[in-house]
Image (cartoon, rainbow, N blue to C red):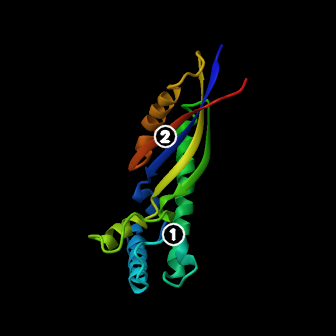
């Protein structure tokens, strides 16, 4: 008898820039640098002690709207690429794969602080929308019932199969999902 083992995985990955840039009219570095310059200028002019999340600048005129639109477009491409790659790669490996959510880390509050050494350069890297965090659920059919630790096997399999699709990738968590019979 086969048993269903369902595992939830959280993955953080950096998409290859060349793959993203082939869909764009300008380089990702240029986008990140322009955003970082305008945000750094705004933070200095307004004497903020931190760099706000990107969404903050949708309510101010501290950043040109075309840059925010460009980020949103790149994020859409990154999300689509991520979902397509994950499904293409993992569908033959697991019994089922469902991508639950994909978030771009460009929208997170930067960990860089004004006054830090090379703050603007670090900020430019943060504002390149090539890092995503995604949640997915995978199902495996196994001969034995799922036991604590079964999620480790799914984590290793997912990492092994996905690692070449990203510049850098880490499966940050894996949890066994209880299936009621």
Screen quadrant of the C terminus: top right
Q: Give the residue furthest to the top.
A: 1
Q: Quadrant of residue 87?
A: top right
- The residue under the point 51% across, 31% down is 154
Mark 2, other Cα within 10 Å: few <14 / some 14–19 / many ≥20: some
User: Label 1, label 2: how many angstroms apart (C-alpha)?
Assistant: 27 Å
Mark 2 highlights which residue?
Answer: 173
Above or below, 133 against 66 in this view is above
Screen quadrant of the N terminus: top right
User: Is 96 on the left-hand or right-hand side of 128?
Assistant: right
- The residue under the point 41% across, 43% down is 164
Mark 1, other Cα within 10 Å: few <14 / some 14–19 / many ≥20: many
Residue 71 marker: 1
- The residue under the point 54% across, 60% down is 77
Tag 1–tag 2 contact (CB < 8 Å)? no
Above or below, 122 against 6 in this view is below
Q: Give the residue furthest to the left.
A: 117
Mark toward the start of the polypeptide (1 vs 2): 1
Q: Position of residue 121 (x, y in %)?
A: 32, 70
Above or below, 147 against 129 in this view is above
Q: Position of residue 33 (x, y in %)?
A: 37, 74
Q: Nearer the viewer, residue 41 or 70?
A: 41
Q: Quadrant of residue 112?
A: bottom left
- The residue under the point 33% across, 67% down is 122
Q: Nearer the viewer, residue 135 or 59?
A: 59
């Amino acid at each position: 008898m086969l048993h269903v083992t369902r595992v939830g995985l959280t993955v953080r990955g950096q998409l290859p820039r060349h793959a993203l840039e082939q869909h764009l009219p300008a380089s990702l570095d240029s986008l990140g640098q322009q955003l970082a310059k305008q945000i750094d200028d705004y933070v200095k002019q307004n004497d903020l002690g931190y760099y706000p999340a990107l969404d903050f600048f949708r309510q101010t005129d501290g950043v040109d709207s075309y840059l925010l639109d460009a980020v949103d477009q790149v994020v859409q491409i990154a999300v689509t690429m991520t979902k397509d790659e994950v499904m293409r790669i993992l569908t033959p490996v697991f019994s089922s794969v469902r991508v639950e959510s994909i978030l771009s880390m460009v929208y997170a509050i930067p960990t860089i602080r004004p006054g830090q050494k090379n703050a603007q350069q670090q900020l430019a890297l943060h504002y390149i929308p090539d890092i995503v965090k995604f949640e997915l659920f995978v199902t495996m059919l196994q001969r034995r019932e799922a036991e604590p630790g079964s999620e480790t096997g799914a984590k290793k399999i997912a990492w092994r199969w996905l690692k070449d699709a990203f510049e850098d990738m880490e499966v940050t968590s894996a949890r066994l999902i209880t299936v009621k019979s």
